[in-house]
Image (cartoon, rainbow, N blue to C red):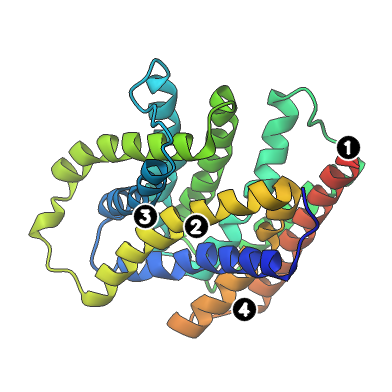
C-alpha cells in the first residue's frame, strides 16, 4: 500500500462525514416513513451506483450463483436487520446517540473475532480498549435526560443493529475471495428481494404522502450513505489498506454528534461527551493493538 497523501485523508474524512450524516437523515426520514420502508429504500437506491459500477467495470454479479444462500443470509444480517433496527430505534432516540451506539462496531467485532477466528485473540491493549469503550456505552445509558423508560428498548435495538453489522462481517469471510463490488452488489440485490414482500405487507408506502425533507433524506441514505459510501470505501481500501480505512471509526461518532446538533439542534449533555470520548479512546486502543500486530 502506498503512503497516504493529502487526497487520501480528504477522502477518508469525506467517507466519515457521509456515514455520520446518515444518522440525522434517518431521523428526518422517520418523520414520514416507517422503518421497513426506510430499510427498503436504502438498499434499493444504494444498489444503483454499485450495480452501475459493476456494469461499467464488467464485474460479474453472482447473486444467483451456487453461493446465493450466503449472499441472501449476509444481505439479511448485514443490511435488512440493521437498517430496520436503526430506523426503528432512531424514531425514539436522538440521532447523535445512535451515532455513538453504532460506533461500538469495532469493539463488538473484536470480541466476536476472539471467539470465531484463530489469529484475532484478546491481548492486554485490546482488553483495555474494549472495557473503556463499553464503559462509555454503559455510562451513556445512565443519561436519564436522553435515555429513559420510554426509549430504553429503542436504544438497545440500535446496539443490536451494530451487532448485526459485526455478525455480517464474520459471515462475509465465507465469500472473502470474491470481489468486494460483486459481494456488495449481490447482498444489496438480496436485501431488496427480502424487503419487497415485507414492505408491501407491513407498511404499504405507496399510500403515504411523505414530507419533502423525508423524501430527500431517504434517497440520500440510499444513493450516498449506502451506495456511494461503499464505493468510496473500496477506493480507500485498495489504495491505502484496511488499517488506514479503519481510522474512519474515530470520526463517525464525532461527526455524527456535531451534524445532529447543526441540523436538528439535538441536545449534547455532559454524559454524551464523556461517552463519546470513552468510545473513541476504546477504539483507539483496539486499533493500536491491531496495528502493532501487523507491524
Query: Residue 269: which disc?
Result: 4
Answer with left or right where residue 212 lies relative to residue 60: left
Regarding mark 4 in the picture, which secondary structure is present there? Answer: loop
Front of the two marks 2 and 1:
2
Structural distance between the alpha carbons of marks 1 and 3: 36 Å
Structural distance between the alpha carbons of marks 2 and 1: 32 Å
Query: Residue 229: which disc?
Result: 2
Q: Which residue is mark 1?
A: 123
Query: Residue 280: which disc?
Result: none
Relative to 282, residue 291 above or below: above
For marks 1 and 3 on the same chain, the one whose residue lies earlier in the sequence: 3
Few, some or many C-alpha atoms within 10 Å of disc 3 (few <14, some 14-19, many ≥20)? Answer: many
Residue 68 seen = yes
**Closest to the observer: 101 or 171?**
171
Front of the two marks 1 and 3:
1
For marks 4 and 1 on the same chain, the one whose residue lies earlier in the sequence: 1
Regarding mark 1 in the picture, which secondary structure is present there? Answer: loop
Regarding mark 3 in the picture, which secondary structure is present there? Answer: helix
Which residue is drawn at the image coordinates 51% and 44% (left, top)? 160
Structural distance between the alpha carbons of marks 2 and 3: 22 Å
For marks 4 and 2 on the same chain, the one whose residue lies earlier in the sequence: 2
Residue 275, position in %: x, y? 69, 66
Which residue is drawn at the image coordinates 33% and 50% (left, top)? 48
Front of the two marks 4 and 2:
2
**Closest to the observer: 138 or 203?**
203
Cβ atoms at labels 3 and 4 below 8 Å apart: no
Front of the two marks 4 and 1:
1
For marks 2 and 1 on the same chain, the one whose residue lies earlier in the sequence: 1
Front of the two marks 3 and 4:
3
Query: Residue 88: which disc?
Result: 3
Amino acid at each position: 500500500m502506498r503512503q497516504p497523501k493529502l487526497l487520501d485523508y480528504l477522502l477518508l474524512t469525506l467517507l466519515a462525514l457521509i456515514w455520520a450524516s446518515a444518522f440525522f437523515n434517518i431521523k428526518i426520514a422517520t418523520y414520514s416513513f416507517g422503518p421497513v420502508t426506510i430499510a427498503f429504500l436504502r438498499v434499493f437506491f444504494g444498489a444503483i451506483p454499485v450495480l452501475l459500477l459493476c456494469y461499467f467495470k464488467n464485474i460479474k454479479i453472482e447473486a444467483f450463483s451456487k453461493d446465493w444462500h450466503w449472499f441472501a443470509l449476509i444481505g439479511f444480517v448485514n443490511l435488512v436487520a440493521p437498517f430496520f433496527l436503526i430506523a426503528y430505534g432512531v424514531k425514539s432516540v436522538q440521532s447523535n446517540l445512535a451515532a455513538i451506539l453504532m460506533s461500538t462496531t469495532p469493539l463488538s467485532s473484536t470480541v466476536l473475532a476472539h471467539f470465531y477466528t484463530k489469529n484475532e485473540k484478546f491481548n492486554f491493549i485490546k482488553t483495555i480498549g474494549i472495557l473503556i469503550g463499553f464503559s462509555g456505552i454503559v455510562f451513556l445509558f445512565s443519561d436519564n435526560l436522553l435515555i429513559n423508560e420510554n426509549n430504553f428498548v429503542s436504544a438497545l435495538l440500535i446496539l443490536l443493529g451494530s451487532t448485526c453489522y459485526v455478525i455480517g462481517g464474520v459471515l462475509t469471510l465465507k465469500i472473502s475471495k470474491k470481489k468486494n463490488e460483486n459481494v456488495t452488489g449481490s447482498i444489496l440485490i438480496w436485501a431488496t428481494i427480502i424487503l419487497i414482500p415485507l414492505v408491501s405487507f407491513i407498511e404499504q408506502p405507496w399510500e403515504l404522502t411523505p414530507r419533502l425533507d423525508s423524501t430527500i433524506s431517504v434517497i440520500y441514505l440510499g444513493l450516498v450513505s449506502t451506495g456511494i459510501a461503499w464505493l468510496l470505501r473500496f477506493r480507500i481500501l485498495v489504495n491505502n489498506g484496511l488499517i488506514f480505512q479503519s481510522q474512519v471509526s474515530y470520526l463517525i461518532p464525532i461527526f455524527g454528534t456535531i451534524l445532529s446538533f447543526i441540523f436538528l439542534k439535538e441536545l449534547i449533555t455532559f454524559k454524551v461527551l464523556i461517552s463519546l470520548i470513552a468510545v473513541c479512546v476504546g477504539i483507539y486502543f483496539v486499533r493500536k493493538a491491531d496495528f502493532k500486530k501487523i507491524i
